[in-house]
Amino acid sequence: MTGQPVLEIRNLDVDYGLGDQAVHAVREVNLTLHRGEVLGLAGESGSGKSTLAYGLTRLLPPPGVISGGEVIYHPPGGEPYDVLGLSDRELRAFRWAETAIVFQGAMNSLNPVHKISTQLTDVIKAHQPNLSAAARTARAREMLRLVGISPDRMESYPHQLSGGMRQRVMIGMALALEPQVVIMDEPTTALDVVMQRQILGQLIELRERLGFSVIFITHDLSLLVEFSDRIAIMYGGRIVEEAPAETLYRDPMHPYSQGLLGSFPALRGPRRELAGIPGSPPDLRAMPTGCSFHPRCPKAFEPCPARLPILGQPDAPTGGGRTVACWLHPARVPVG
Amino acid sequence: MKYLLQRIAFYLFTAWAALTLNFVIPRMIPGDPVKSMISRFQGQMDPDAIESLYVLFGIDKQAGIWDQYVDYWGQLFRGDLGLSFTSFPSPVSEVIGTSVWWTVLLVGITTALSFAIGTGLGVLAGWRRGSWIDGLLPATTFLSSVPYFWLGLVAIALLAGPGSFFPSSGGYEPGLVPAFDQYFIPSAIQHSLLPAFTILISSVSGWILSMRNMMVTVAAEDYITVAHAKGLPERRVALSYAARNALLPNVSGFALSLGFIVGGTLLVEIVFSYPGLGYLLFRAVGAKDYPLMQGIFLVITISVLLANLLADVVYMLLDPRTRKEG
Amino acid sequence: MTIPTSSIDQVIPGEGAMAQPDTAPAAKAKRQRLRFVANGKAATGLIMLAIYCVLAIIGPWIAPYDPDARSNDLLAPPSAAHWFGTTHLGQDVLSQILVGTRGVMLVGLTAGLVATVLSVLIGVTAGFLGGAFDEALSALSNVFLVIPALPLIIIVASSFTTAGDVVVALTIGFTSWAWGARVLRAQTLSLRRRDYVEASRATGESTWRIILFEILPNLTAIIASGFVGTVIFAVMSEITLAFIGISSISSWNWGTILFWAQSQQALAQGAWWWFVPAGLAIALLGTALSLINFGIDEFVSPRLRSSGKSKVKTASGQTVRMRVGFTPVLASRPVRATQVARSYPAAPVSNGKVNGAHVAPRKEEVK
């Protein structure tokens, strides 16, 4: 199942604003999502991870603009195409049918004035106009059952549901058209820890049954370690390290990844010293020269402020199947 | 249901407050407006009218303030608002009864129409920001800054006059008898066109602007992004998701500003000598006809409260969150 | 009569899912302050208002005639001698307007001030103290909000035997504070729950100190907006009172001019110059104040600002409007040689779904 790419992000640049005033929120991001895989995207707030998710689906509100790059989608059995090159009509047809999104604000993602049933069926109606109303309702009920909500809830309004139920409804809605890719942007931040794990566990199980791929965005690296196959770490709008989840957890190479991992208690294995990362995320309007992490980096040395490290396969014994952008581990095979 | 009951209780309270205000104001005024009034109508007032005036104005020195208050409510519940001076000896309730329908129809229809048109244009302006409608905003700002009555004056000067289709004053052709027949109704409609148009022009811009701003605000909500992400047709996102939610604050804004709007529209009647409450109030002010003025204030207040209640019912139908079960 | 167009109470900026990158707060605050003055709408409004204020002060001195003085030019159209023409008594309309400006501005600003002070007292107290206080004060302001203001003002003002400027200003001020109080209460409620307010409460600062130093500074924009809105309403009400003959007609204001124009049948006689200048003066003053309020609105909630550039040129050379839901794609990055082979065309759409059955027509690959 895994191995085939389903979504390739190439050199994606996303800005806020135009011309000289543009703030570069995402820079030269290269990322490949494989079929059936859960790809985790982690970083502090302001690292550009959400911007990346909204950018690749062109959902970023003004003044966001995509200033360069490609997002190549590989439909199963079909010829790949660039999502950013689609016309509005094509893009509308592409959305939800191929890539669905579960948004950050579980509370505000549902339209407060419409019933759950309306919001579940309207998306089916928009994409499969030939389906009868009865078939649409049946499908919607099936989706609710799939995420563990009683179909009696169809006639409820969002304010009558708890936060966890609303997020489940959103997940059910995301799966309604059986998309190839599900992007989850901090899907469980507003929920309590028990509910978080319950919902994520359910999602992973559904993925195994339905075979979609997931891009899972969160600032909570511990969740990623547990639930994703591969993890990419973002800092200052760039990907600074990407590796299989297990590898990244055991042997983080970028000092920033090490810092992130050091800021939560170990789930398994020996106890570690808890340590945060000193300083605060960089101001995107005034990015440091060279590696943008160098002002906060405990291991910074002379090339760091001067030159930007490129993301590439590190020249190290454990370097297989992973990339990092750090002068401590100069790239042997640059990516992109 | 609970929501509605709360609102009704609030309006009852407001009505009580307004009526009490009506009772208190004349009693707080220094001087004695009634005495001068009685002297103006010397010999024409029968003792009954003078007595009711005393009660209304609280100059009745024999009774304590509480007894006066009870008397005042007793009169109100009998529908007795006193006698009008201008059309002496007709009771105020009768005088108001003949003009209230003119106002209800003119102001009611135009206000509803203005809200509907303004909201529609506001949806367009807010959804398609930077389109030609945004260019209209300065003009509408100017129009909403013009007093209603002045716009009426300009409309009369430009459009009405001898030989014009639009009559410049009155509610119907002089000589016709008010009745629901084929002569009176068309004439009444013809006479109301220009006042209605005036009210419409000056009030619509406020609705355009507030709906536009609400649309812009709502467009940044998460559920709008979700609607886009779902690939729904543009129309559905704009109407069923954005406009449907933006409408809610606009409806409650509508309820709250009814009091302002009605005040403004009454003045248009003055300019057009339209036989409604506004024109009546104008004449009552000119003649210092206090009982009539107070009666008109009461009727206007109660009508506005009823309209508010109606707007609340509409809001309740629009927003499921207010329809809590149980 | 004017609908309060301020939307501040509805637009309490929230953190959306896509909060934009923050900048250093100090620099931001400074930039914002500058931006308010640089805001075209606000600047235009402020300049216009300044002109009115100057006219209010110097109006009586620069008026070419005594506004009461009669002359033999009865109902004369505009001419070099009488720029705005004359009335039925031969009075100079321009002089009446200039002399009347002072009364209009004085009453408008006084009423605005009275109403704003009341709305701050009632709104902030209600919002901050909460509980029974809040219930009672909110009910009070809702009552005043729902009762039609203008008829109430007419009733009150006409109860006085002579309604001078002071009476009119106070009447308007005491009846039109409710809208501002409502908005301020809502905002205070939300401010009260902010961390820094909770913090100063925890450190035992006195209630009044918190209100004065933590709450009020954050309400400045809303208070200003409420003040401007009330001034608009007060000017309109005052002119209306004069127009229907309630306020004393001995002192000049624009409403008085309109009163005479209306009662002397200026319309029927075709004397447009008698009522047009006064109306325009009112409308321009109203516009100036509304523009200031738009400026404040956009300052408080940047979303409302029409961005300088709403259209961008895309990769394909088209010009598209920036809008929610479809982020413009400016340009594809110049693709390096090794990548040319792997650049894909956009897929054609067949019947609503991209690649209906996930199969696209095969395209020759460039090697």
Image: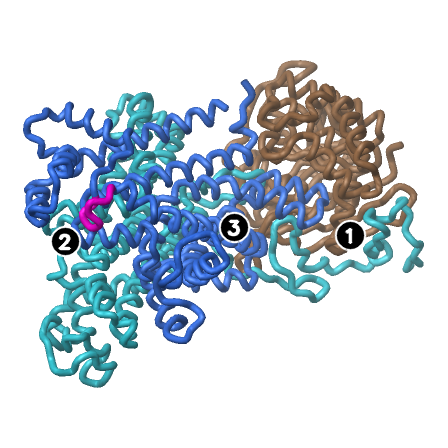
- Quadrant of image for the C terminus of chain C: bottom right
For image coordinates 63% across by 53% down, the residue present is: A65
Relative image position of residue A240 (x, y in whole percent): 67, 40
* Disc 2 target residue: C165
**Is residue C141 placed above or below B117 in the rendered structure?**
above
Does the magenta-highlighted stretch encompass residue B10?
no
Label 3's element? helix
- Disc nearest the viewer among 3 and 1: 3
Q: Which residue type carries mark 2?
A: Asp
Relative image position of residue B109 (x, y in whole percent): 46, 50
Which tint is chain B? blue
Discs 3, 2: same chain = no
For image coordinates 19% across by 27% down, the residue present is: B71
Q: Which residue type carries mark 1?
A: Glu
Relative image position of residue A196 (x, y in whole percent): 65, 21
* Residue A175 placement, left or right of C300: right
**Cα distance between the residues tagged 3 and 2:** 38 Å
Which tint is chain C? cyan
Which tint is chain A? brown
* Disc 1 target residue: A90
- Disc nearest the viewer among 1 and 2: 2
**Is residue B229 placed above or below C279 in the rendered structure?**
above
Residue stretch rendered in magenta on the structure? B84-91
**Cα distance between the residues tagged 3 and 1:** 34 Å
For image coordinates 43% across by 35% down, the residue present is: B309
C3 vs B313, nearest the viewer? B313
Can residue A63 be seen here? The reply is no
Label 1's element? helix
Q: Which residue type carries mark 3?
A: Ala
**Is residue C332 placed above or below C95 in the rendered structure?**
above
Q: Main secondary structure of the magenta part?
A: loop
